Amino acid sequence: MHARAVVATTTALLGTAALLLPGSDARAGAEPPTVIAHRGASAYAPENTLAAVDKAAELGISWVENDVQRTKDGKLVVLHDDNLKRTTDVEQVFPDRAPWKVKDFTAAEIARLDAGGWFSPVYADARVPTLEQFMDRVELHHQNLLLEIKNPDLYPGIERQTLKVLDKAGWLDPHHLAGRLIVQSFSVDSTRTVHKLKPAVKTGFLGTPPTADLAGYATFADQINPSYGSISRSYVASVHAFTGPHGRPLEVFTWTVNDADTARLVAGYGVDGIITNNPDVVRDAVSEDAGPAQERTSAPVALSVAGRTVGAWTAMGSTSSRSRGPSSVPTSVH
Ligand code: G3P
Ligand code: CA
């Protein structure tokens, strides 16, 4: 038998065994999941600010997540809620502008706001960053970006605009596409649009689709990123059994896991990434037996779309070493 076939057969058998053994750890012997700082290291610095990116870097975390929305005058900014109330002093600065929606303020107006004082007086000078500023800071620290397009229904065309900003900042070159950028959304349409506009970009769908629908998602999403409370070992294995649009097994980045026990639990399910406000806690929990989580990457693999090589990327987590089930033929998403 050809060596590759032997490996495939062996790993398939091992994968089956791992699924059948009650209480077995799907990640046994594999490397720990990637750790992603949710809205930056948001347990330690105000979410989605440059300070939160800096804090993640200080903790040695190489992946950060953010949320992208659009201002009244068409600039992309990094903020989670669709309004400015919770994370800025907008009610004091603009008392007559209720309900203080992001889309009703210009970028210059938003730049005046204190985006850190709500978290701690220490951060009172923090601002709502533009997407460009955020990416510049991520680049400065040589970090990687899990970019979420937030509330895309409020911002028609935000997918194309986001890609344009990414391109201008140099994030759509082969180096960044090869493992430094993922674009995700809760919106099927938005995720699919990103894939259609720029097929080489790695994409993630936020949610827990029924396993019967995963084949459809695998036509445009490289990741299925569910809340941790919605998954099980068998769900993760089901996702891994599908091959994504770039010819790689679908991955799972789960959120938002902020304690060590839950981190170990979902790592045992075999997830590829854990999105967390406490990246140091999760990193330490999942790397206790397997070495530093941020230091395990495999060699880049060819990145192809519809049979055409468009670059290369590095598989996340233990994707390169974990056994996989059979891929299925993609169908439409319901
Ligand atoms: O990245 C996953 C997570 O950010 C999704 O939820 O509401 O924090 O954007 P949310
Ligand atoms: Ca988010």
Image: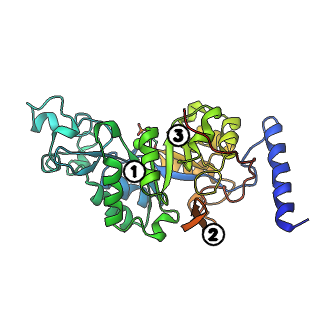
Q: Percent from the top left, x then y, of residue 191?
A: 45, 45
Taking the image in four quarters, ligand 1 sits in the one at: top left
User: Quick one: label 2, few (<14), some, or many (20+) residues within 10 Å?
Assistant: few
Dot 1 lies on which element? Answer: loop
Report which residue position mark 1 lands on: 40
SS of the residue at dot 3? loop
Quadrant where the image shows the C terminus: top right
Circle 3 Cα neighbour tier, 10 Å, few/some/many (<14 / 14–19 / ≥20):
many
Q: Which of marks 3 and 2 is nearer the N terminus?
A: 3
- Picture quadrant where residue 322 is located: bottom right
* Front one among 78 and 166: 166
Q: Which amino acid does label 1 sit on?
A: Gly
Residue 190 at x, y percent in the picture: 41, 43
Give me the C-alpha separation between circle 1 and circle 2: 26 Å
The quadrant of the image that shows the N terminus is: bottom right
The residue carrying mark 3 has its beta carbon less than 8 Å from ligand 1: no
Give the spatial CA distance, label 3 vs label 1: 14 Å
Residue under label 3: 257
Q: Tell me where residue 241 appears, x and y as whole percent.
A: 70, 45
Instruction: Return the residue at label 2.
Output: 299
